[in-house]
């Protein structure tokens, strides 16, 4: 059984069909990319997958459970995390504190118990800090733990947002344009980080325009054009698919 199942999803806005009968599966342990030209329906589909938009038709299931109509915070609790194209960090907080915000969604300590400094809450806080540092190390950010988010360069901010999303304990993470605005060195650091995240048991779905990154990290690629799926398969097949070349790539991507 697939971890994420998208079946005949359609989303309309008035007379515009933004997503038109799109289906695909995401299997546990893979990195799946979602690509297409501007206006292809990628962001709308992402919003449907994470319940920011409700589909007009079709089904979205995570581990056999329907996500349609579910509140976004309940989807997070099930094990689905998302990052956004524009970084949304707590600027005045350090990198460590940003990750701790995500971890506190999994904490047993409430406001009253924390205010009373009960012994078990102190043990819980120590555990959370250790886990936050582990996530920062995973993303290569351990040396920036005490740096305010506002002072981090763009590439590290992208990695910090992924670390914070990981703090919610997802099995599936959806990344919206994680390489936007990154230079070549930062993009390679991102690719390496995505492999480490995958190897730590998190399945990834990535919307991305950087074809170098997509071809490097993806196990499979779904291609959208004008709201419809026009191709799906491994990178070597996608980059040679005539419909994909015509709609998006323009020419085959070099190996």
Image (cartoon, rainbow, N blue to C red):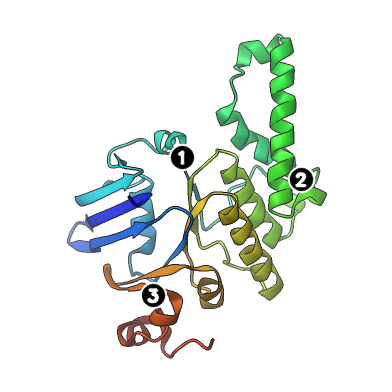
Residue displayed at 37% across by 73% down = 233
Q: Check residue 220 in the rendering and tell me which mark sits there, or answer none.
A: none
Secondary structure of the residue carrying numbered label 3: loop
Whichever of callouts 2 and 3 sits on the residue coming sooner in the sequence is 3
Q: What is the quadrant of residue 111 in the picture?
A: top right
Dot 3 corresponds to which residue?
37
Residue behind mark 1: 79
Q: How far apart are marks 1 and 3 (CA)?
A: 29 Å
Residue 48: x and y in percent read 33, 50
Extreme residue toward the bottom, this view: 251
For disc 2, the marked residue is 148
For this rendering, which residue is in front, 60 or 63? 63
Structural distance between the alpha carbons of marks 2 and 1: 28 Å
Secondary structure of residue under mark 2: loop
Residue pictured at 69% horizontal, 30% vertical: 128
Secondary structure at badge 1 equals: loop
Query: Residue 203 in the image: x percent, y percent?
Result: 49, 53
Q: Are marks 2 and 1 in contact (CB under 8 Å)?
A: no
Dots 1, 3 in contact, CB < 8 A:
no
Question: Disc 2 vs disc 1: which is toward the camera?
Answer: 1
- Residue at coordinates 60% horizontally, 40% vertically from top-left? 167
- Residue for point 38% across, 55% down: 46
For marks 2 and 1, the one nearer the N-term is: 1
Q: Residues within 10 Å of mark 1 (few under 14, many from 20)?
A: some
Residue 171, visible in the rendered structure: yes
Q: Which of 199 and 144 is in front in this view?
A: 199
Of pointers 1 and 3, the one earlier in the residue sequence: 3
């Amino acid at each position: 059984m697939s971890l994420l199942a998208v079946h005949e999803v359609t989303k309309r806005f008035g007379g515009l069909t933004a997503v038109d009968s799109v289906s695909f599966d995401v299997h546990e342990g893979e990195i799946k990319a979602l690509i297409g030209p501007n206006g292809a329906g990628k962001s709308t589909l992402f919003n449907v997958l994470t319940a920011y938009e409700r589909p007009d038709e079709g089904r979205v299931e995570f581990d056999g459970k329907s996500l349609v109509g579910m509140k976004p915070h309940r989807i997070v609790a099930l094990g689905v995390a998302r990052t956004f194209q524009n970084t949304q960090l707590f600027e005045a907080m350090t990198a460590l504190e940003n990750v701790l915000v995500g971890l506190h969604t999994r904490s047993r300590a409430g406001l009253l118990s924390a205010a009373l400094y009960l012994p078990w809450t102190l043990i819980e806080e120590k555990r959370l800090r250790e886990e936050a540092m582990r996530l920062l190390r995973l993303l290569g950010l351990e040396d920036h733990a005490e740096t305010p988010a506002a002072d981090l360069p763009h590439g590290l901010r992208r990695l910090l947002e992924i670390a914070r999303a990981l703090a919610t304990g997802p099995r599936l993470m959806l990344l919206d344009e994680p390489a936007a605005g990154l230079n070549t060195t930062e993009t390679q650091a991102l690719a390496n980080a995505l492999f480490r995240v995958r190897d730590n048991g998190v399945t990834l779905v990535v919307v991305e325009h950087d074809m170098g990154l997509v071809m490097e990290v993806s196990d499979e690629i779904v291609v959208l054009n004008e709201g419809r799926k026009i191709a799906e398969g491994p990178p070597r097949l996608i980059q040679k698919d005539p419909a994909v070349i015509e709609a998006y790539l323009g020419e085959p991507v070099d190996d």
